[in-house]
Image (tube, rainbow, N blue to C red):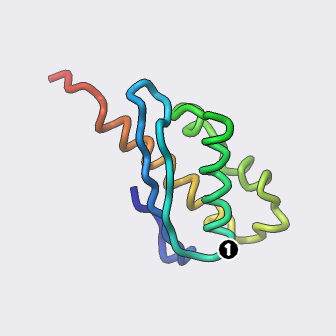
Amino acid sequence: MPGGGPECGGSVVVYLKGDGDGRIADLSFTGAGDTISMGAASIIMQKVHDDNLSMAEVLDLDYGTFVAELGGEVVGSRTRNATLGLSTLKSAIRRYLRERRPDTR
């Protein structure tokens, strides 16, 4: 799932593999951008891995809390850059869940 925009000048592609039971089986990313966007993307991917977060838990993560954990003084006015990885990860999870939803027609 690609993410990014001209306002932050960065781009991230998230590769997500679900286990079919709401858990993340594999997760990686590639990207280009400034230190804030790439560093924050790396940190959120590592957090998901280390804390063994479920897809639902990732979707519940708060952007403001994440920025505070990174350090508001480090992020400064580049909040959009800092949340690029988390935003793209959430989009990838939503897409995965949407595409895995059983057809009820």
Kindly identify the amino acid type of the residue bearing the numbered disc 1.
Thr
> What SS does tag 1 mark?
helix
Above or below, 78 relative to 2 = below
Rendered image quadrant of residue 78:
bottom right
Residue 85 relative to residue 93: left or right: right
The quarter of the picture where the N terminus appears is bottom left
Percent coordinates x, y for residue 8 in the rendering: 57, 74
Percent coordinates x, y for residue 6 in the rendering: 49, 77
The quarter of the picture where the C terminus appears is top left
Percent coordinates x, y for residue 76 in the rendering: 78, 70
Q: Dot 1: within a 10 Å radius of its alpha carbon, few (fewer than 14), some, or many (20 or more) residues? A: few
Residue 91 relative to residue 100: left or right: right
Q: Nearer the viewer, residue 2 or 77?
A: 2
Residue ID at (64%, 51%):
44
- Label 1: which residue? 35
Residue ID at (57%, 61%):
84
Which residue of the protein is positioned furthest toward the left in this rendering?
A: 105
Number of residue marks: 1
Which residue of the protein is positioned furthest toward the right in this rendering?
A: 73
Above or below, 8 relative to 88 = below
Residue ID at (62%, 65%):
80
Above or below, 92 relative to 102 = below
Rendered image quadrant of residue 57:
top right
Q: Nearer the viewer, residue 91 or 50?
A: 50
Percent coordinates x, y for residue 55 in the rendering: 51, 34
